[in-house]
Every structure is written in C-alpha cells, then in structure tokens.
Amino acid sequence: MWFTSDNASGAAPEIMAALTRANEGNARSYGAEAQMDQVRDLVRRIFEAPEAAVHLVTTGTAANALSLSLLTPPWGAVYCHSHAHIAEDECGAPEFYSGGAKLVPVGGAHGRMAAEGLEAAILRAKGAGVHGVQPGAVSITNVTEAGTVHSASEIAALAGVARAHGVPVQLDGARFANALVATGATAAEMTWRAGVDVVSFGGTKNGCLGVEAVVIFDPAKAWEFELRRKRAGHLMSKHRYLSAQMAAYLQEGLWLRLAGHANAMAARLARGLAEMPEVDLLHPVEANMLFPEWPEGRHASLEAAGASYYPMPSPMGRERARLVTSWSTTEAEVDQFLAALRG
Amino acid sequence: MWFTSDNASGAAPEIMAALTRANEGNARSYGAEAQMDQVRDLVRRIFEAPEAAVHLVTTGTAANALSLSLLTPPWGAVYCHSHAHIAEDECGAPEFYSGGAKLVPVGGAHGRMAAEGLEAAILRAKGAGVHGVQPGAVSITNVTEAGTVHSASEIAALAGVARAHGVPVQLDGARFANALVATGATAAEMTWRAGVDVVSFGGTKNGCLGVEAVVIFDPAKAWEFELRRKRAGHLMSKHRYLSAQMAAYLQEGLWLRLAGHANAMAARLARGLAEMPEVDLLHPVEANMLFPEWPEGRHASLEAAGASYYPMPSPMGRERARLVTSWSTTEAEVDQFLAALRG
Amino acid sequence: MWFTSDNASGAAPEIMAALTRANEGNARSYGAEAQMDQVRDLVRRIFEAPEAAVHLVTTGTAANALSLSLLTPPWGAVYCHSHAHIAEDECGAPEFYSGGAKLVPVGGAHGRMAAEGLEAAILRAKGAGVHGVQPGAVSITNVTEAGTVHSASEIAALAGVARAHGVPVQLDGARFANALVATGATAAEMTWRAGVDVVSFGGTKNGCLGVEAVVIFDPAKAWEFELRRKRAGHLMSKHRYLSAQMAAYLQEGLWLRLAGHANAMAARLARGLAEMPEVDLLHPVEANMLFPEWPEGRHASLEAAGASYYPMPSPMGRERARLVTSWSTTEAEVDQFLAALRG
Amino acid sequence: MWFTSDNASGAAPEIMAALTRANEGNARSYGAEAQMDQVRDLVRRIFEAPEAAVHLVTTGTAANALSLSLLTPPWGAVYCHSHAHIAEDECGAPEFYSGGAKLVPVGGAHGRMAAEGLEAAILRAKGAGVHGVQPGAVSITNVTEAGTVHSASEIAALAGVARAHGVPVQLDGARFANALVATGATAAEMTWRAGVDVVSFGGTKNGCLGVEAVVIFDPAKAWEFELRRKRAGHLMSKHRYLSAQMAAYLQEGLWLRLAGHANAMAARLARGLAEMPEVDLLHPVEANMLFPEWPEGRHASLEAAGASYYPMPSPMGRERARLVTSWSTTEAEVDQFLAALRG
C-alpha cells in the first residue's frame, strides 16, 4: 500500500528490458547514439511537431529550470500557480538557472491558474517600468499540484493571455501522460496548438527510472538549451541509458497505458472514499492524486495496516492526506487501503 | 575497436544485475532508500573516513561543479591545470555553479600540476587586495587529462601548498579507480590523508551507467551540498537507481578489478606501440589513456579497419590520437588495433 | 510644489560645501582618504558601536542588495513586507546579488511587517526540508513604504522572531533619519540593540547627492562586503566624494535636522488635509510620506496649479496620490498645495 | 608629486562649477532630468552616432561589466589582453555581471592584444562544441594597461577578426580621451567605424568626480542595459549629478584639453627619464602612464623627496615603478620628480 508518490514505484518491465538491451556493446556518447534518433522521431510524431527540438535530462527539476532559463531573462517574472512545484518544491532551481528571476504567484482554485489573475499580474509588471522585474515567462503545471487537470482549452486561454503580452509559455508536464489520459486531448492540442513554447515531458513518475524530455517547439532555441544543459552537468555521457528508457516509454503507447492505469486506480480509490460519509475530498480527483480529509485517528490505524502516504497540515479534529497512485498500483492495494480506512 | 572514451563502453554485468534487482517493488525516494545506507557504509569504509558525507549525482561535471561551489566563494580563484577537464570540457560549469568564480590555469608537464606554479599563482592573488579575485580552491585531476597519474605524495605536496595558504582542495577523480590501481595507493592516502577536502569519485567511466559519488570529509558541509544539489536538479527522485549502481560498483572490489583491466589493456597497447619505431607516445602511459603520434596516413587505414578514437591536432607529416581503454576493452581489440596500425 | 519624491530635492548647502572643500588637491583613492576615517568614527559614535564596519555606496538599491547578499545564501528566503522597496522597486537586485534568493512577502497593515506572519513564513520554510528554500534573512523597512514607522520595540519584536530561528536581520533605512526623528529612538535602539545585523543607512533622500552607508555590526563580515562591493562596481575610485558627503551629513546633527524638517512639512500637510472632509488619508502620516485620497478631478486642478507628485491607482470616483516632503520643502509650498487642493 | 593614479586627482573646476549649478532646486530623477538630454546630444554628436544609446554610471568597473553582460551569454568566452583591467583589477566583476562567463587571456606586446592570438583563441572555442564555452565578446582596452595606445586601424583589425566570427566588441575606454589625443583619431574612427559595439567612455580619471558613459551603438540593446543597470543598483536617483558632470566634461572640448595636458605631462616626464642612462622605460610612453626601471635605492630617495607612485615587482638590483599623470599634474611636479630621481 504505497501511495506516497509516483516516484516510489519502480520502472515498468518494458523499460527495464529496453535498458538491458541498450547495454550491449559500445555506443556513441552524449546523445549521438542511435536510440536518441528514435526518441526524436517518436516525440516529433506524438507531438505532430516535425521541427521540434528534443532533449533528455534525468529530473523534472532540471527539465523545468532549464526550460524556464531559456524563456525568461534574469530580470523576468515567472508567473506560476501559488503552489506550483517550481515555487515550492525545487529549492529555488528556477532562480538559480535563470540567474535570479522572480517567481510571481498567481492564484486559482484547486491548483489551476486563473487567467484573470495572470493578466493582472502581467499588467502590474508592465506598469513598473525599469524599477520592477519584467514579464518573463508563464509556467503552467498539468496535472496540477492539486491533482486536477487543465483542459487543452484552459491551457489555450492561459497561453493566450501570455502571448497577447508577448510572454512565452512553459508547461510543467511531470505528469503529462496522466493529463492527456484524463482529458482525452492529444499532445499537440495540449501544447503548441494551445500556445505552449516548451514542455517538460515527464517519464520518471510514470514508469521510467529517471528521464524527462524537454520539447522545444522553436528549434532556433535548441543550441542554447544544449549549452545550458551541458554547463549544468545535465548532459549524460552514457546518454543511451536515457534514450533507451524514453524510446521504450513512447513505443506502442506504453506511456499512455501506464498513465491510464494510474488514473484508473485513483478513480477506484476516489469511488471508495466517496462511499464514506466521514471522508471529504479537498480537490476533484481527475488524474492520479487524491487529497482526502477524514476524522482524527485514521492516520494511526492506516499506518498500523501498512499504508504509506503523506499526511498534510490539518484542521482540528480532522486529518488530511495526499495519496498518489502509479502505473504499478494494484487494485488489491486500493481495496486494502479502503478496507483499512473503513476500520 | 572502440577507443574513443571510457564512456563509450556499457555497464558491467554486475551493475546491470544490481539495477534490475533494485527495480523490485516500491522504495523510498530522494536517497532515503536502503541501498544508499549501504553505499554510505561502503564509501566510508573504503576511504577509512567514518564521518564522511557521501552524495550521488549522475555526471562528473555535476560532481565537480557542485564540489567546487562548496569550496570557493563567487569571487574566488579556482586553481587547476591548464588543460583540466573543468577548464576545457565543462562549458563553464564551475563558473555557473560557483556564481562566477575564475579558473586560474597552472601549468605542469604531462597534465600534472606543478607545485611551484600553484604557489606562485596563489601568492599573486593574495597580493591583489580587494581589486583581484581571492584564492578560492585548488582542483587536482587524477588520472590527469594527459593520462598520467599523480602519486599520493604528489597530491600531498600540492595540497600542502594549498593548505599552507588556507585554500581547500578538490580532487576530480573521474578515473579515481584507475589512479589507485596505477599507484597502489589507498583511497585514504590519495585523498584526506594527503589533504584533499572533497572528492568527485567516478563510477560512470568505469562500468556504471551514470553515477558519481561526491565524498566530503568535513560532514559540516553536507547539508549545504544537499541544498545545492537539489537546487541544481541533481537530486534524483528514484534515487535507488543511483545507489544500486554504486553499491554494486564498490562491493567485493569490483571497481578496482574493472579499472585494473582497463589499465592493463592500456599497458598492452602501449607495449605494442613501443615496438613500432615510427610511433611516439606524447605522454607516459600510466593508466588507461594513450596519446600516440604516428606518420600521416594511419588515421585512414585505422578507420578502414574499423577503429574508433579521437584524432588530435597534429604537426605536419604526423598524426596524433587519443586512445582510451575501458573495463570492457578486450585483448583481441587491442591486438587487432595494433595489427591495423602496423598495416 | 515638488512632492514626487525626496530624491527630487537637491543637496543641502552644508553638503555641497563639504564636497567643494574635498575637491582640493590629490587624495588617496578607494576609501583610503582621510575623510573616510572621519565617517567611520562618526557612524560608530552615532550607533554606539565602536567595532562596526562602515562602507559607502552610491545608491539604496546597492546598499540593500549588497547587505542582503551578505546575510542570505542563494537558496535562502528573504522575508520582507509585501510592498517592500526591495520586492517592488529594485528590478530584482536582491535576487541578482544573492545569486537567486527568493523574496517571500509577509503582510501587515500600513506597510508594517506583522510578527506572526513572519514567524509563520519561517516555519513553513523549515518544514520544507531540502525541497524548499531555507530561511535566509529578514529585511525590515523603516520608514515603511506606506510612510509609517516601526518603533524600536516593533523592530525588536520582528528581529526577535528572526533570531529565535537563527535568521539574520537587515534594516532598509533609506529614510532612517526620518524614522529616528519620528520615534525619538536612538540609532542604537533602532538597530543592534533591537537585533538588527546590518543597516542600509540612507543619505541620498535626505540632503546628500548620492551616498548610503552600510553599517555592519559584526566586523567579521566586513572583508566579504568589500569584495562584493568591488566586484559589483560599487567601490568608487575617487571615494572622497562619498566620504565628504557622509561626513558633512553626520556632523553636528545635520542629518537629524534635515529629516526633522521633512517630517514637520509632512505633518503640516497632514494637518491641512485633515481639515478637508472630502480628503482621506490611507495610512497614518508618521514621517515624510502621505497617501491622500480625494474626489475625482483634483489631479487636474493640482497639476494646473503646478503641483508635482505621483498619482496612484484609485477606486471609482476618487483619486489617490503619494506625496513626499523633503529637507528642502518649504512651508509656502505646503500651503500653496493645500490652497490649490481646496480649489 | 602625486603619480599614483589619475584617480588621485580631483575634479576640474569647470566640472565642480557645473555640479554646483546643477544643485539648484528640484529636478526629475533617474535620468529624466534636462541635463541628461544634453549629455545624450553631446555624446551622439562627438561619436557621430545619432542613434546611439547613452547611459551613465559611477565607476569604470560597472561600465565594463554591464557592457560585457550585454554582449556575452553566461557560457561565453570574453577575450581580453592577459593584463586587462577586467581580468586583473575588477575582482571578477565581468564574471558576476555576465552570470559566469570566462575571461580568456590573449597575449600581445606592451599591453596591446595581438590579432593572431585573438583569432587562434576564437577558433579553439569554436572547435570545442558543446563541451566548451562559446565565443562571447572581445574586450579591447585603449589606453592599454601598459600605457600604450591602439591606433584606430589596430582597433579595426582586432574588431575585424571578432566580427568575422560573429563576436561583438567592447572597448574599455577608461582613458578614452587620452587615446584619442595620442592618436589623433576621432571618437567615431576609434569605435563604431572600426567595428566596436559598446564603449565604456571614462570621465572619472580625466577630471570628473565619478562618471562614465556607456555608449551603445545599437539602440535595440538600450532597454536591456537599463534593466541591468537598475538591477545592479547603478541607476542613480539624483541622476542630475552624473549628467551635470558629463555635460561639463564634453562641452567645448574640455575632455580633450584635460587629456592633452595629462599626456603632455607624461611626455615631459618621459623626456626627462630618457636623458638618464640608468633609467629604462619598459613600455613606450604614448599617453599618460610610464613604467620606468631604475637602479635599486631610488624608491627610498624619491619617497624621501615626497613622491607618490606605485612600485612594481622588480628584478634584482633594479626597481620598477608605475607613474601616472593627470589633468592636474603640473610641470613643476614633473620637474621636481626628475630632480629627485637624478638625486
């Protein structure tokens, strides 16, 4: 019963198998290996973006921070949701990579950035002249930190505000597959067709060992990205171990199948919770994260039953939790958790 | 016949097997997994340093740049050999990570830093007052970029100069195992006993997929390192895949066996080259790199025979090359190369 | 009728005279001139801090950003009021100088930081572990951006929260003299006795041409400050022109007389506004800034009458303004402004 | 007998008078004052560059570091003479401002950068691919640190190499006026006509209190410069005190007259030294700096006679010195120095 995070799960068998195959013999290094060509082709086909630049890194923080450093100057404001991962969980990586940009929080219910709030924030910066930071970039997270999902048209609305003011848009897609499965949108609809410039396209949380693709729709920015990546120590020498993972992940829809399973397990968990009147859900369950609240005392009994997850700050008399399902969550685990919660 | 670099080779079977085992089930993330405890124990035992902090990252550039940023202020001079990897092959990573420190080249024959040159450079900085950068750190590479090796007492001499001026010392040990095998020194003799503060202890080039340990002998610096690593996007979430590699690498002397093989293959190659009067070696062959020079025309015939390696800038009528052997180089490959060169 | 800012006024005659005197003959440069010794003595005596380090720079932004870079690591949170000058009016200078620290806004009525809000923010950071930025420094502004004043005991309360958590404290005293005059506190009571570590002690807005003193109560940090200042291009070569201003400013209480006059002019203006029922004051007038709100249409008539000041974003049917008095504001200007407003 | 540096001299009477006049009444701040319009006109006329952007800062280090940060990316190499001021005397300011660029020294006799050395260095960087820093900018100093002068055609040759490789060019003109007087070139010939993109045009060393103009020939870069300057704390609020100095400096050829005097005093000193067979000059005297070498013992007698200057590292039995003349050096001082040296 592991629901701490989707990074507690292992790698999918198809991906481990690909890694093992990739280990045969010598190979060119630094991304010049054959598998990377395959990755590039797969990503471009999936995103319907034949010119897109595709680069691999090992962590979501690197993918986000490098992407943003490509879009914002050091004196830029990066607009993101108040609880965005880049704002709260990356120890200032965007500030480090960008040379000191300022993250400007934009509110919005259930983890979704509000378009009016975004516009207001951009207008404030424009009015500040030389004394204030300038609009730099917008960062949208999908799946959001609250486990909700932006539809492609919501992304388009936010990106529309940004582009009307000449501000580029990054998508933090650490759980991009889960968002596509949840909305039924295509990768293209959710990104460049909606106005997104760069995507952090996650693999790690969804069955890889550790690989994220950065997809840059304007190939003119690719060389700068490569230099920034190298300079940050994120260009792997035995790069084939990244490209082999990503190639296996993207082949034959594995990535969508894995995410579909994770989302389905979350839905099963949500249905079970909905049947318990003493349990509330703080946010709609739309992908693979749940934020339930239950009466005081359940943490102890769940722990005793062997459940792992993160407790959250809670009001008096109640307990809150974050639960995350993954590609490897089983129905049995879900049912066992529900049973333990029922007591 | 791959001699381009030791990063062209794959991972050793023991390490792939460990990775596959580590993939079972769920695990705690971000280094809280059980394998990391094992790595810490192994490293401390090998280095005879029971208090040392041990952290893993995926690339040598990250290991070096993070280490140096721990030792030098932004206004510091980092003394390194004129042809050090950090100076020539990391796209300014030390400058990026340190917030703008200045790499100050120190000369020395065959890739080895000269102690007098180091002292002169430190004294120059001390005389510059507030107008110049201040002594920040010394970075020594072992195995050097010329394929030679510093003995433990040479390291101690350099570190002695540094410490006499209050300057901390980092060791770039991307090929640390090869250096130990070549000199017969212990890990402790080559590092903290010689006056080294932080080591980049490489695994990638010697049979891992991609993992380097940063060993910090003063544990008071460990927390800062962790924050810097996270902020740089170098804290892997599924960290078990790093610790599993490193644990397998360090168990039962695998790391030394692999390096011993690589060095032996280089020695075999060197012996073969020594028998050809038209071939010179630009640097003594002490570990797993060779820098031969031969008559013009051999590049073409070697390429035709299927050999891969890096040609180097060469004088008129001659051709220079860099050849690197690895844990997976075979005697057959070496002999085949020599035969092809003989023509 | 200039009320745009206290930086619209010129330099006081005593200060221009000192500058002219300082221009005689040759002098040592970079702060080694005799006047700097005098400045150091004066500042130490005024602050009752015989060990304090004292350094001069030309702008408040430099004083603040350099001070903060001394106190916070790049991965630190700098707690400041939501509308602090460092947050809104310095184009990200603290982020630049600190290497990417994050400004964390703390609320509070009328521009004063609330101690509970500060404590809550520090506790949040402590709970985030390696994934979040760490408590770095607290920056308190006195006079605040709303023209109100923190008493020495309010400063002590805020600094007490900070110090209880091991967080150092900077005071942005661009209008420090005005704050002392307003509260009757001594320089020592308002700073180190209250727990402040570093002060930006402003001269420019209060009758100098352009000089701010950075007062560092722990002299062990002085050398780092000097290196940071030089590296930022803020070490003036003909430094005597800074020290001459500051020496004249501090002699015979000139600085307090000038600030006393500015505050008195603001009080006179406030009394006049209080007599007009259609005019509200958004914040208490405690030093030399006023934030009145009056009926729509007055901007036009005031402009026609020759008044200069900044209009502010306003609600329907009303107009808001910021008015700042200075050492050179005259009673006649104040009365003329009030007459024009009365219409 | 002050020959320590041209920053030991005061401000010329015309400039102090202008400062005193500028102090009258209130003025708009941050460069919106009337005097700045005048400065812009004067600079554009002098440089025959009607579109040039003109910005003022208080130090040469700020002018250089801000200029370079406009031209080079953080992963760029900045090519400069091995003994350039930016390399040796600015405590890493270019590295700080650029976000970690690397200064790459280029040799050349008597302080002048050699065009072949520059080309070789650029070609090396181009060959390094993603692993090395990329060509970023060239920085030429005129007057050089050795007191020699690049002619306009020498500047054009260096800039020609840079531009052929797409690398922009900055001119460190801390002693720009002295260089023009020495060569007879016009400001335009020495800069944009020769291929220079940005000039640090010094005033401080030549009779101002502390002001340098940054002249940017491509006005599209002006806004970025303004943001960088503000963010660095180098936008003066009472900016009129900078523009008043610069306006007076540029009016009626004052700047060239002052530099002409400084150069003439250096020439007089050089003539006197040439008459002493025991005195050598290490570099040709072309502007206002001299590097004599004389027999051991003269430092003591000169000091006893009241001479101030910097002694330099010297060979056995000899003594070396740096002497700098300025706008305020008198013939009497020169003759007195020569007499003291003769003994």
Image (tube, coloured by chain):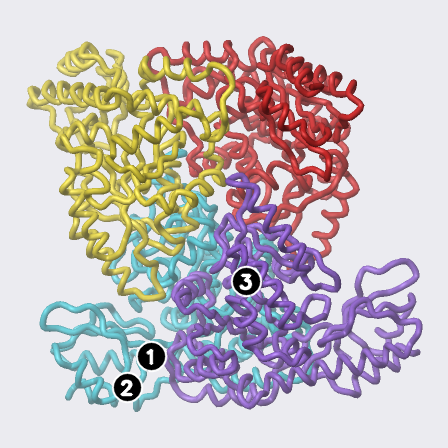
Chain colours: A purple, B cyan, C red, D yellow
Amino acid type, residue under disc 3 in the picture: Val
Q: Mark 1 — residue?
A: B325
CA separation in Å, label 1 and label 2: 9 Å
Residue in view at x 43 percent, y 80 percent: A36
- D199 w.r.t. A154: above or below: above
For badge 2, the amino acid type reads Val
Tell me the subunit letter for badge 2.
Answer: B
First in sequence, mark 1 or 2: give its number: 1
Q: Quadrant of residue B145?
A: bottom left
| Residue at 61 percent of width and 36 percent of height | C85
Relative to C133, A215 lies left or right:
left
| Image location of residue D100, percent across then percent down | 41, 51
Which quarter of the figure has residue B89?
bottom left
- Place of residue A266 in the rendered image (x, y in percent of width and height, measured from the top left): 76, 79
Q: From mark 2 to mark 3, how far is it between C-alphas?
A: 52 Å
Q: Are marks 1 and 3 on the same chain?
A: no
The residue singled out by tag 2 in the image is B334
Q: Nearer the viewer, residue B198 or C4?
A: C4
Choose mark 2 or mark 3, whichever is in front.
Answer: 3
Report the disc number at residue A169. 3
